[in-house]
Amino acid sequence: MRYKLKFLIENDIEMDINYNLSLAEAIKNLVSPKYIEFIDNGAFALNGRIYKPWTFSRLLPDKYLINNSKLIINNGYIELILSSIDENFLFSFLEGILRKKGLSIQNCFLPLNSISVINNKVRNILLCKSISPLIVRDYEIMNIKEIDIINEVTKSIKTNLISKTKVFKKINVNAEQINIDILEQEKIKKKFIKIKTEKYLGFDLKLKIEAPEEVNIIAYNCGIGIKNALGFGCIEHLKISDEKIVYRI
């Protein structure tokens, strides 16, 4: 299940361009502490790793500019997509944001304007684009040949989806059941991302994922690659979304 949150700011705001950790913390702060404890205690754990069943997009403002290390968002609307395989997470978050009437990130407050439900059907073929950078793992990739980067990215997405399907759906799938093609490879955008002390290479791209429907549902609702709960690897259908406003101020 996925929601589109729309905020309306009356004045320009400024924040650090690397705001993912701040946004992840802001979202987490609106969720029930009991739910966070439930997750941290291993509700969705596999081989010693805790998987978090949600992801979110980058902030999507109407108007913005980048000045050195700062993101300046001009007055107007800002959208945020929030998605999860677990309705308990979404309901807890919605309860929190409706109570606070907005989202606090860094020194900025984003007043809530509306909430929409996005009702896209997910089948065994998923044509999608990233709406937050995809990262796969922390490795030195600068000197790897372009074709090897593509192979590494698709292999890592596939391995990660196999693990997520097992932990979230209790279903075992194998690599032969999943086929991933990166579309329009010449248009891939890459950027280096620092998360705390670790460096990653992020990708904005378009994908075709052919897999059992359960796998694609997880890819769509939980993200692809790693660090999804920090706002990486969120994807959206290439086609126009079917959405319905369920709350408006």
Image (cartoon, grey):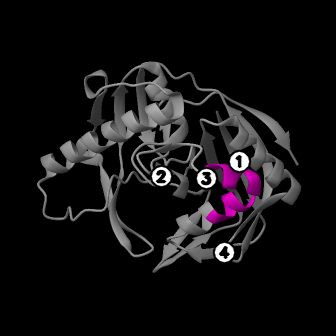
Q: Position of residue 228 (x, y in %)?
A: 49, 51
Helix, strand or loop at disc 4? loop
Answer yes or no: do the residues labelled 1 and 3 have beta carbons within 8 Å? no
Relative to 146, 139 lies left or right: right
Q: Where does residue 15 sit, x and y in percent of width and height?
A: 60, 75
Q: Quadrant of residue 101?
A: bottom right
Can residue 181 be seen from the camera position used here? yes
Q: Is residue 92 left or right of residue 223?
A: right
Q: Is residue 57 magenta?
A: no
Give, as a single range, the part of the protein colored magenta. 25-39
Q: Gap in Å between the C-alphas at discs 3 and 4?
A: 28 Å
Label drawn at residue 156: none
Q: Which mark is residue 106?
A: 4
Q: Earlier in the sequence, mark 1 or mark 3?
A: 1
Circle 3 sits on which residue?
A: 41
Report the quarter where the N terminus lies: top right
